[in-house]
C-alpha cells in the first residue's frame, strides 16, 4: 500500500541524516523532495504546495525548540501531523440509527460498490450487531443482482431484489418497506454506476436519494484512478452532497493521491478503506494510522485489533496446555494458520508491524505461502498429523507424492516445525525466556 510514495518520502528524510539541526538550506531541500513525492503520487500540485508550505513553516519554527530530537525524526513527525490533518484529523463513524437506517451507495461502474455493499453488511452485522438487508437497485448491469445475491449469502444478510422491476426509485422504496416488515435495522441500497460521470446517472442517483432520504450516503471510489477519483468525488458531491467516501482497491499499486486529496477537495471524510475481494477485507479509515503506514511506521493498533477479532480464549488455553506437554501437532499448527489467514492479506499484515514494511516490500509474500504448508499437512494421515514424531522417510516420500512437492521441501518444513515446537515448549517452561523474546522484538522495532 503506497509503496512508491513511502519510498520517495523516506528518501526525502534520508537527506537530513547526519545533520545537526534543521536549517533553511536542508529544510528547503527536504521540502522539495516531499513535494515531488506527493505530485508523483498523483496529488494535485496546489494541494502538495500548500501541504509542504505548512511543513516548512513548522520545521523552521521548531529549529531552536527541540534541539534534542534528530532533524530527520523531527521532519517525519511534522509531516505525519500535517498528513493526518490533510486526511481529516480523526475517524468518522457511520450513522446506522433508524427504522430501518438507510445507507445509500453511489459511485462509478467498476469502483467496487457491490463488493463494498457486502463488506459493509458484514461489518454492521458482526461489529455493530445490527440485522442488515441489502437492496439490488442496479437495473442495468446484468450480473449486478447475481453478484449482490452471492455476497449477501456470504455475509448472512437479507436481500431485496426484483429482476422484473426496472425502476430503481420504486425498487429502493419497496426495499425499505420489505426491510421494515422483516424487522431489519439497516438497509444498504446498492445503485447502478456508469463508466463515466453523465447527466442521466446523476439525475437517477439524485432521484433515489430524494425518494429514500437516507441516513447516510457513501461515495465509493477506485483509489487506483488517482486524480480522476478526486474529480469524480467532486462531481458526485455537487449533485448528491454525500456524507463520506469509501476508498477501494488499496491493495493494488496505489499512488496515494486519492487518500491524500479527497478530504481537502470535497470537504467530506474518508469513512472506510477496502482492499481485495474477501468480505472481511475492509477497515474503518483512521487518518493517523494511514499516515503511519504511508511513512513506513506500521500500524500496530490495527494489527492488534485484527488479532483480537480472531482470538479464541478456549482455543488459546487448549493450545497452551498442549505446548506445555510438548504435544503441539500439525492439526494445531493448521488451526493457527487459518486464524492468521482470517486476519487478512499476509503482506499487508506484516506491513502493519513497525519496521517490517521495509523488510518485506521486495519479498514475494502472499497467501500462496500458506497453500504449500496446507498441502503438506493435508497429505498426512490423521495419525501422522496428531503424532509428528512418527514421520519416517517412507512416510515423507508418500507425503511428497501426495502434495506434489519434493522430499527436500518436506524435510525442511518438518525440521522447521520441530524447531518451532521445541522452542515453544522451552518457553512454556520458562516465562522469563518469553519476556526476553518480547523485549528483543521491541528492540528490533
Image: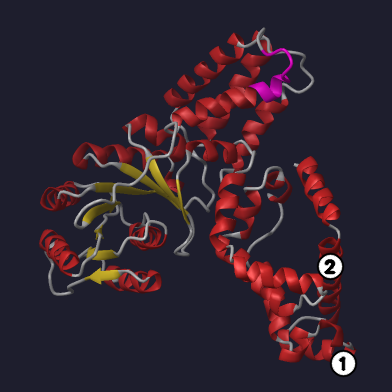
Which residue is identified by label 2?
425
Please report the residue visible at 46 percent of the width from the left and 63 percent of the height from the top: 277
Which type of secondary structure does the marked residue at label 1 adopt? Answer: helix
Are there few (<14), some (14-19), or many (20+) residues within 10 Å of tag 1?
A: few
Q: Position of residue 163 (x, y in %)?
A: 18, 74
Tell me if residue 17 comes above or below residue 248 in the rendering: above
Tell me if residue 253 comes above or below residue 330 in the rendering: above
Would residue 138 be seen by someone viewing this image from the given angle? Answer: yes
Would residue 372 be seen by someone viewing this image from the given angle? Answer: no
Q: Is residue 433 left or right of residue 97?
A: right
Q: Closer to us: mark 2 or mark 1?
A: 2
Which stretch is magenta? Answer: 66-74
Foreground pick, 301 / 111: 301
Which residue is identified by label 1?
394
Quarter occupied by residue 130: bottom left
Magenta-span inclusion, residue 69: yes
Lower position in the chain sequence, tag 2 or tag 1: 1
The residue at the far right in this view is: 393
Please report the residue visible at 42 percent of the width from the left and 46 percent of the height from the top: 225
Foreground pick, 232 / 313: 313
Q: Position of residue 331 (x, y in %)?
A: 70, 79
Amino acid at each position: 500500500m503506497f509503496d512508491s510514495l513511502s519510498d520517495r518520502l523516506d528518501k526525502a528524510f534520508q537527506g537530513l541524516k547526519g545533520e545537526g539541526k534543521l536549517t533553511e538550506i536542508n529544510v528547503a531541500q527536504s521540502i522539495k523532495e516531499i513535494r515531488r513525492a506527493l505530485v508523483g503520487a498523483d496529488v494535485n500540485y496546489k494541494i502538495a504546495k500548500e501541504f509542504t508550505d505548512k511543513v516548512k513553516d513548522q520545521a523552521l519554527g521548531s529549529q531552536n525548540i527541540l534541539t534534542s530530537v534528530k532533524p530527520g525524526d523531527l521532519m517525519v513527525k511534522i509531516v505525519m501531523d500535517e498528513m493526518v490533518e490533510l486526511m481529516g484529523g480523526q475517524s468518522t463513524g457511520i450513522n446506522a440509527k433508524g427504522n430501518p437506517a438507510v445507507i445509500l451507495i453511489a459511485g462509478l461502474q467498476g469502483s467496487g460498490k457491490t463488493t463494498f455493499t457486502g463488506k459493509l453488511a458484514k461489518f454492521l452485522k458482526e461489529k455493530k450487531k445490527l440485522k442488515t438487508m441489502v437492496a439490488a437497485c442496479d437495473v442495468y448491469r446484468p450480473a449486478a443482482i447475481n453478484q449482490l445475491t452471492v455476497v449477501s449469502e456470504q455475509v448472512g444478510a437479507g436481500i431485496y431484489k426484483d429482476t422484473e422491476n426496472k425502476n430503481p426509485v420504486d425498487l429502493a422504496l419497496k426495499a425499505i418497506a420489505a426491510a421494515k416488515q422483516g424487522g431489519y435495522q439497516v438497509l444498504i441500497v446498492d445503485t447502478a454506476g456508469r463508466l463515466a460521470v453523465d447527466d442521466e446517472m446523476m439525475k437517477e442517483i439524485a432521484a433515489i436519494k430524494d425518494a429514500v432520504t437516507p441516513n447516510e450516503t457513501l461515495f465509493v471510489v477506485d483509489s487506483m484512478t488517482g486524480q480522476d477519483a478526486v474529480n469524480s468525488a467532486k462531481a458526485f458531491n455537487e449533485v448528491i452532497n454525500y456524507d463520506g467516501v469509501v476508498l477501494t482497491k488499496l491493495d493494488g499499486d496505489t499512488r496515494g493521491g486519492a487518500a491524500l486529496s479527497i478530504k481537502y477537495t470535497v470537504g467530506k471524510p474518508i469513512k472506510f478503506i477496502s482492499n481485495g475481494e474477501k468480505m472481511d477485507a475492509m477497515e474503518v479509515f483512521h487518518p493517523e494510522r494511514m499516515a503511519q503506514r504511508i511513512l513506513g511506521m506500521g500500524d500496530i493498533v490495527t494489527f492488534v485489533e485484527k488479532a483480537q477479532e480472531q482470538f479464541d480464549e478456549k482455543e488459546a488455553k487448549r493450545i497452551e496446555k498442549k505446548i506445555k506437554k510438548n504435544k503441539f501437532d500439525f492439526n494445531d499448527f493448521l488451526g493457527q494458520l487459518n486464524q492468521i489467514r482470517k486476519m487478512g492479506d499476509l503482506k499487508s499484515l506484516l506491513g502493519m508491524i513497525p519496521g517490517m514494511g521495509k523488510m518485506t516490500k521486495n519479498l514475494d509474500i502472499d497467501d500462496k505461502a500458506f497453500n504449500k504448508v496446507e498441502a503438506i499437512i493435508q497429505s498426512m494421515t490423521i495419525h501422522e498429523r496428531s503424532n509428528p514424531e512418527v514421520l519416517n522417510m517412507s512416510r515423507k516420500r508418500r507425503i511428497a507424492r501426495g502434495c506434489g512437492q519434493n522430499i527436500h521441501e518436506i524435510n525442511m518444513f518438518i525440521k522447521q516445525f520441530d524447531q518451532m515446537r521445541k522452542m515453544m515448549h522451552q518457553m512454556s517452561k520458562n516465562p522469563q525466556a518469553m519476556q526476553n523474546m518480547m523485549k528483543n522484538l521491541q528492540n528490533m522495532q
